[in-house]
Amino acid sequence: LNRSVGDLRCGILKLRQRLEELLDAEDTTFWIDPDLQDLYKTRHPDWKLNEPANQRTLMVNSRLKPSSESINAIKDLKPNQGLVQGDDLIAFYAPKTISELPTALELKAAGIELIPSQLTLYQNLSELINDNERLIRLDFEQFFYDQDNYFETEPGVTVLNPYYIWIGENVSLNPGCVLDASEGPIIIDEGTTVLPNAVICGPAYIGKKSLIKVGAKIYEGTSIGPVCKVGGEVEESIIQAYSNKQHDGFLGHSYIGEWVNIGAGSSNSDLKNTYKNVKFYSYASGEKIDSGTMFLGSMVGDYVKLGINTSVNTGCVIGFGCNLWSSDLIADFIPDFSWGRASQLTKYRFEAFCETAKLVKKRRGLDLSPEEIALFKKIWELNNG
């Protein structure tokens, strides 16, 4: 995923967006990986990126799991205090003007009182998947429930529990579609079209200018980012922006990056036949780790393409920029820029990858920027020595 942790979607919002809103931030500077800086300057020219933080600036880890407890704990901090969880910094006030993230020892030496905390930091994508349903509910109550949102529907549209449904401007709900908010809220953002006979069960979020296809079944715990086309059956999954899963097939308990295309008839497993916890490959540790849950589908990187009738095993991690097709089961871990059948993988030529990426973005009226190409090249080189 070619973005900072704060730009990962979970619930209705991205992690950084929610923290900004809940902490009432008036002015924000984002500290991101230096490798992302040039790309982010192009994407967000008005953002303050990696600028020095002045004394008494509140610094917050974007991996913080949001709750009333965690937000109140940060708001209660005094200018000479910080919160830690083990070796991880959760939040602190800068003791002086700083240009890089200090260690806990450096903060202590500068006079910051570090308070041990039981607050939680997200460690991996599986934790975002498992927390998505809760955050859809939290976001709806916090940002949408009290907004006036009167909407009318065409004849033939079925709406259950309309008080827990929020519809944006220029949303098209076609006859035969069902919005069932009896078990949780539904938010359909502006410019989205829901085609006939689609069923959306809350809690669910559908992003701006997305298309929900005929007969789609969108179950609880699903967040779909802007400009996506989604059909088939989707449950407890997060899809970032500009990704397509248009056809029949099952997607469950999964995290899908941007610019992903999932071919017709493709499905993933999210439950082992043994009903044991699912293990998945961790980039950080370089080995499989226990997810702590028996339900986990796939984690799919940006710009991945899956051919028709592709089968993806439980807990599969598919790296950035892969192009895969196979009647074989795709399982375990597929490295970045892999090409071909699951049993006969080769490296995706970088020039060929960029050519396809340019065509994909051009179809949406966008260009592949030099900054994107430079970042993708770094990722490619990491996997090719």
Image (tube, rainbow, N blue to C red):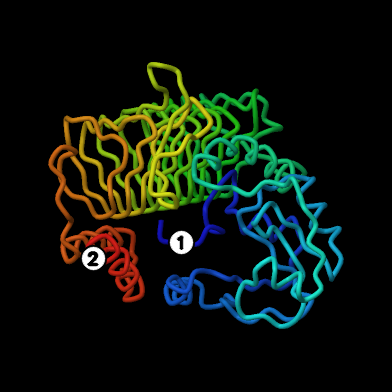
Q: Tell me which amino acid carries mark 2.
A: Gly
The quadrant of the rendering that contains the C terminus is bottom left
Front one among 282 and 247: 282
Residue 146, placed above or below residue 71: above
- Classify residue 342 by image quadrant: top left
Q: CA distance from mark 1 to mark 2?
A: 22 Å
Circle 1 or circle 2, nearest the eye:
2
Q: Tell me which amino acid carries mark 1.
A: Arg
Residue 242 position, x and y percent, is 39, 52
- Dot 2 alpha-carbon crowd within 10 angstroms: few under 14, some 14 to 19, many 20 or more: few
Q: Which mark is residue 385?
A: 2
Which residue does the image show at 50% across and 62% down from the upper left? 4
Front one among 199 and 140: 140
In the rendered structure, the answer to whether residue 190 lies left or right of residue 349 reads right
Residue 63 position, x and y percent, is 61, 54
Which residue does the image show at 71% across and 83% down from the upper left? 97
Q: Which residue is mark 1?
A: 3
Discs 1, 2 touching: Cβ within 8 Å: no
In the rendered structure, the answer to whether residue 344 lies left or right of residue 53 reads left
- Dot 1 alpha-carbon crowd within 10 angstroms: few under 14, some 14 to 19, many 20 or more: some
The quadrant of the rendering that contains the N terminus is bottom left
Q: Name, please, the residue furthest toward the top.
A: 274
SS under mark 2? loop
In the rendered structure, the answer to whether residue 364 lies left or right of residue 323 reads right
Which residue does the image show at 58% across and 71% down from the upper left? 31
